[in-house]
Image (cartoon, rainbow, N blue to C red):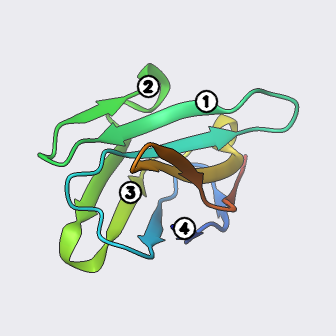
Amino acid sequence: QVRLVESGGDLVQAGGSLRLSCAASRSIFGIIMYWYRQAPGKQRELVARITSGGITFYVDSVKGRFTISRDNAKNTVYLQMNSLKPEDTAVYYCNANFFGSEYWGRGTQVTVSS
């Protein structure tokens, strides 16, 4: 069993920044790590992904504003979010596949006020 624990969500004004963290209960070396989000009334969507080698992917709506990174020594993945917009308001979830099983964190709430 693997635990993923997100933190860093908060209420912030539009244009502000937040840094989310996702701490895993085991080594993330060699594991692709993902950030998803789910806004009220909407489906969960992929926000960003980072491979073990540091190759990143971003959904178009966050390109240039969000940065995903990882610290394998700390078993932690981060999501730096800048220039936040009200439409970024959502619960943000960490996700990964360990040994063929998919794991999700419980999420952290990000609310961006206009």
Q: Residue at x 67, y 35 (%)?
A: 87
Q: Which residue is mark 4?
A: 1
Give whichever of discs 1 and 3 has the lower sequence position. 1
The residue nearer to you, when weighing 19 against 95, is 95
Give whichever of discs 1 and 2 has the lower sequence position. 1
- SS label for mark 4: loop
How far, Cα to Cα, is label 1 from label 3? Answer: 17 Å
- Rendered position, 26 above or below 39: below
Residue 84, position as x, y percentages in the image: 54, 47
Mark 2 residue crowding within 10 angstroms, few (<14) / some (14–19) / many (20+): few
Q: Which residue is mark 1?
A: 45
The answer to which quarter of the image holds residue 59 is top left
- SS label for mark 3: strand
Asked if labels 2 and 1 touch by Cβ distance under 8 angstroms, the answer is yes
How far, Cα to Cα, is label 2 from label 4? Answer: 29 Å
How far, Cα to Cα, is label 3 from label 2? Answer: 14 Å
Q: Which residue is mark 3?
A: 80
Give whichever of discs 1 and 4 has the lower sequence position. 4
